[in-house]
């Protein structure tokens, strides 16, 4: 009589006492229950039985609001750089840890505590195996869910719940929530699998979208205005010297100032050098030398050749314009590109 009520060791190894296999058409819920049982057996030699699976479409905000106390938040990475989340509550974590460290699941609820890095490492294989078997079963059954759940594996554990909102993309997610019985009733935990609701776009579609974006960006950049300033020279002067400038003051320039003009961007970085001239009545600059990117404009002449205190550079011109620029070499109108009327004026 005793032998009839209690299965032998051989029968237990053969699977006696486990739930009967599910027969019929494979559904996502059946595939997930099979994946949990297979993962627990393969990783920890643990009997695990899943309950009813609740599937819901949720937002990123709802994910952060509906988490158990002290959960293990396992970030999983999928194809195309997409991310999802597998959440194990404290009882599920305790069951996996106890089985792998002591060989048995303690038949009482575990004390709630924040999971450690070691806990995450010991649970990572279970998570990967569960996701792997789940996608295999769904793919073999040809379910439409397959593209959306394929390729996700454990990446890292998040330290706290608020990191979920900062890490995951703000999009729609599919959340599968189900209870799990570990060790034939020793502990009952809760697991959530949260993955992007829609499958990642194909490489061809992403490449096409990238091409459209590149063309649009190029059009915007090419339509933008680039403001450049032609600087004849730079000179330092005191505030008193600057205040002494009046209408009619003469500013003497170096002899080669018009033949060696610096072209600067808005940040004052020199982008090229050229020679000042004119074309069709407009002042123009013929480029003669391209400067290194970001090179500052500086005065190559030694300090003792600087102008007297009464002189100033074009950027310090007095109100009303400059009275005279000396010396004045002849302009070379041929082969000069017009700059328009924005160039600093010089008196005739």
Image (cartoon, rainbow, N blue to C red):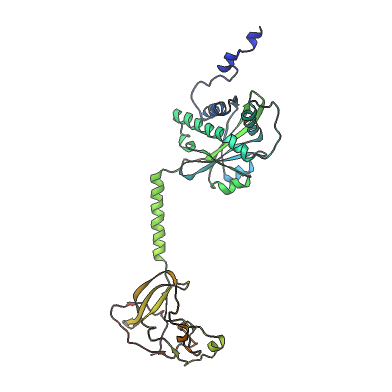
Q: Quadrant of the N terminus?
A: top right
Residue lying farthest to the top in this orientation: 1
Residue lying farthest to the left in this orientation: 334
Q: Is 245 or 338 nearer to us in this picture?
A: 245
Q: Is residue 335 left or right of residue 252?
A: left
Q: Quadrant of residue 204?
A: top left
Q: Quadrant of residue 300?
A: bottom left
Q: Quadrant of the C terminus?
A: bottom left
Q: Tell me where residue 280 appears, x and y as whole percent.
A: 31, 82
- In the displayed structure, 200 sits above or below 318; it is above
Q: Report whether residue 26 is seen.
A: yes
Residue drawn at point x = 40 percent, y = 56 percent: 214
Q: Is residue 187 left or right of residue 335?
A: right
Q: Tell me where residue 74 appears, x and y as whole percent.
A: 58, 40
Q: Report whether residue 176 is seen.
A: no
**Count of picture labels:** 0
Q: Tell me where residue 40 appears, x and y as whole percent.
A: 57, 28
Q: Tell me where residue 191 appears, x and y as whole percent.
A: 60, 34
Q: Is residue 97 left or right of residue 317?
A: right
Residue drawn at point x = 56 percent, y = 86 percent: 239
Residue lying farthest to the bottom in this orientation: 248
- In the displayed structure, 202 sits above or below 176; it is below
Q: Is residue 63 left or right of residue 26?
A: right
Q: Is 135 or 112 nearer to us in this picture?
A: 112
Residue drawn at point x = 48 percent, y = 88 percent: 311
């Amino acid at each position: 009589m005793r032998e009839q009520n209690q299965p032998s060791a051989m029968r237990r190894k053969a699977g006696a006492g486990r739930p009967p296999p599910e027969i019929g058409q494979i559904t996502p819920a059946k595939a997930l229950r099979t994946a949990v049982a297979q993962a627990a057996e393969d990783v920890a030699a643990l009997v695990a039985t899943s309950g009813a699976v609740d599937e819901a479409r949720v937002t990123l905000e709802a994910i952060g609001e509906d988490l158990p106390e002290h959960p293990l938040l396992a970030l999983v990475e999928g194809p195309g750089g997409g991310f999802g989340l597998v959440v194990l509550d404290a009882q599920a974590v305790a069951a996996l840890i106890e089985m792998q460290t002591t060989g048995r699941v303690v038949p009482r609820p575990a004390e709630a505590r924040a999971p450690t890095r070691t806990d995450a490492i010991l649970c990572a294989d279970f998570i990967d195996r569960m996701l792997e078997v789940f996608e295999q079963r769904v793919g073999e059954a040809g379910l439409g869910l397959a593209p959306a759940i394929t390729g996700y594996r454990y990446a890292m554990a998040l330290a706290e719940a608020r990191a979920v909102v900062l890490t995951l993309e703000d999009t729609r997610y599919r959340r599968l929530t189900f209870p799990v019985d570990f060790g034939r009733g020793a502990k009952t935990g809760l697991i959530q699998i949260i993955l992007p609701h829609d499958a990642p776009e194909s490489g061809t579609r992403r490449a096409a979208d990238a091409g459209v974006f590149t063309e649009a960006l190029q059009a915007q950049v090419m339509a933008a205005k680039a403001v450049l300033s032609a600087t004849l020279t730079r000179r330092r002067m005191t505030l008193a010297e600057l205040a002494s400038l009046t209408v009619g003051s003469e500013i003497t320039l170096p002899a080669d100032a018009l033949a060696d003009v610096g072209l600067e961007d808005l940040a004052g970085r020199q982008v090229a050098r050229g020679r000042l001239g004119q074309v069709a009545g407009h002042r123009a600059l013929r480029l003669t030398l391209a400067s290194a990117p970001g090179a500052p404009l500086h005065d190559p002449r030694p300090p003792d050749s600087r102008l007297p205190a009464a002189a100033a550079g074009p950027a310090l011109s007095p109100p009303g314009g400059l009275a005279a620029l000396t010396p004045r070499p002849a302009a070379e109108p041929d082969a000069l590109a017009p700059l328009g009327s924005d160039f600093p004026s010089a008196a005739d």
